[in-house]
Image: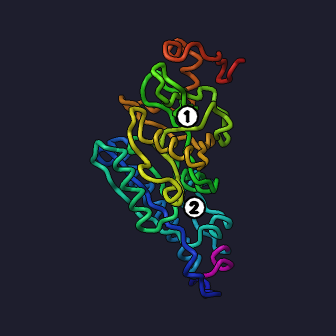
């Protein structure tokens, strides 16, 4: 049985272009490269379906019984609302890997996205593992800058969500001071209102609207001793661009010994090894059965 006859001529102007930005040191990591290929195939299949929908027309396409793009991850399946907002999805890869200057790689990726007049950049560090629905879930927030919940890969692990403030140092210089948001709000959007000062976070898995780089003058990413992603959040805050972390979307960060640090490991460490945090941050709130005791 053939495909239904196209009902209307699609709007050729409605497209969404997403650049997958790879600011990697050496290319796909030994433990994550299988996901690299699988995830790119998923994005390619998603883009293909948006093209078919434009060719067939929404009514004919939406009536098809198509197999899932990602069995076992229902949030990775596009909805009618997703198709309507996205139009035709175009995916491109911008690979500035094999460099020790990650900040410079991120600058080049953002410049390339502007040159290509892309709509979004999906930033993906090579030592991150995540569900394939991560892209759509970040995109559905419809925010200029939004990251997934990630954790450090060093001991003791903690969420890479920070409150940052400018303070006067003893010598009179103005410096930025930050501290981790240990007791982060769970399964929600975290923004400036949840931290002292303004929100900064790690960019291991982050979606940014390309218009952000038109609002903020360069440099966007520069290492100041605290990380190029922290600098990006600082610049965004300076120019009034809101930033969020969606703690419903959880990614795993490869430990140096291939231990995967995620939300469960973090709260286990908080509960069973509280002394690991005290040296740097004094005593934190107690945790019992994964819940903060106040």
Residue at x 53% of width, y 13% of height: 278
Examine the structure image and report whether residue 154 is included in the region drawn in magenta: no
Image quarter of the N terminus:
bottom right
Q: Earlier in the sequence, mark 2 or mark 1?
A: 2
Neighbours of disc 2 within 10 Å: few (<14), some (14-19), many (20+)? few
Residue at x 64% of width, y 53% of height: 141
- CA–CA distance between discs 2 and 1? 34 Å
x, y percentage for residue 138? Answer: 58, 52
Neighbours of disc 1 within 10 Å: few (<14), some (14-19), many (20+)? many
Whether residues under marks 2 and 1 lie with C-beta atoms below 8 angstroms apart, the answer is no
x, y percentage for residue 230? Answer: 47, 38
> Which residues are drawn in magenta?
56-62
x, y percentage for residue 227? Answer: 41, 37
Splitting the image into 4 quarters, where does residue 159 fall? top right
Residue on which disc 1 sits: 161
x, y percentage for residue 76? Answer: 58, 56
Q: Is residue 265 visible?
A: no
Which numbered circle lies on residue 68? 2
């Amino acid at each position: 049985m053939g495909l239904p006859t196209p009902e209307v001529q699609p709007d050729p102007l409605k497209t969404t272009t997403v650049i997958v930005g790879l600011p990697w040191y050496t290319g796909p990591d030994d433990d994550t490269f299988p996901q690299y290929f699988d995830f790119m195939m998923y994005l390619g299949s998603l883009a293909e379906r948006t093209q078919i929908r434009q060719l067939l027309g929404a009514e004919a396409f939406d009536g098809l019984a198509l197999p899932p793009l990602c069995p076992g991850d229902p949030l990775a399946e596009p909805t009618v609302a997703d198709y309507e907002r996205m139009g035709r999805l175009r995916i491109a890869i911008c690979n500035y890997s094999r460099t020790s200057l990650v900040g410079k790689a991120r600058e080049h990726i953002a410049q390339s996205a502007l040159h290509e007049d892309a709509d979004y950049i999906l930033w993906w560090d090579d030592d991150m593992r995540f569900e394939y629905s991560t892209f759509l879930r970040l995109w559905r927030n419809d925010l200029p800058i939004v990251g997934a919940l990630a954790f450090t890969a060093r001991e003791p692990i903690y969420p890479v969500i920070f409150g940052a403030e400018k303070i006067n140092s003893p010598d009179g210089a103005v410096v930025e001071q930050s501290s981790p948001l240990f007791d982060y709000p769970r399964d929600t959007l975290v923004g400036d209102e949840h931290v002292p000062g303004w929100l900064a976070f790690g960019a291991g898995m982050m979606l940014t609207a390309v218009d952000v780089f038109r609002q903020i003058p360069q440099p966007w990413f520069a290492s100041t001793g605290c990380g190029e992603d922290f600098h990006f959040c600082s610049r965004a805050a300076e120019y009034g661009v809101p930033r969020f972390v969606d703690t419903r979307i959880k990614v795993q960060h490869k430990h140096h010994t291939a231990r995967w640090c995620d939300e469960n490991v973090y709260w286990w460490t908080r509960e069973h090894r509280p002394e690991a945090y005290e040296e740097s941050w004094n005593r934190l709130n107690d945790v019992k059965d994964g819940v903060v005791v106040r």
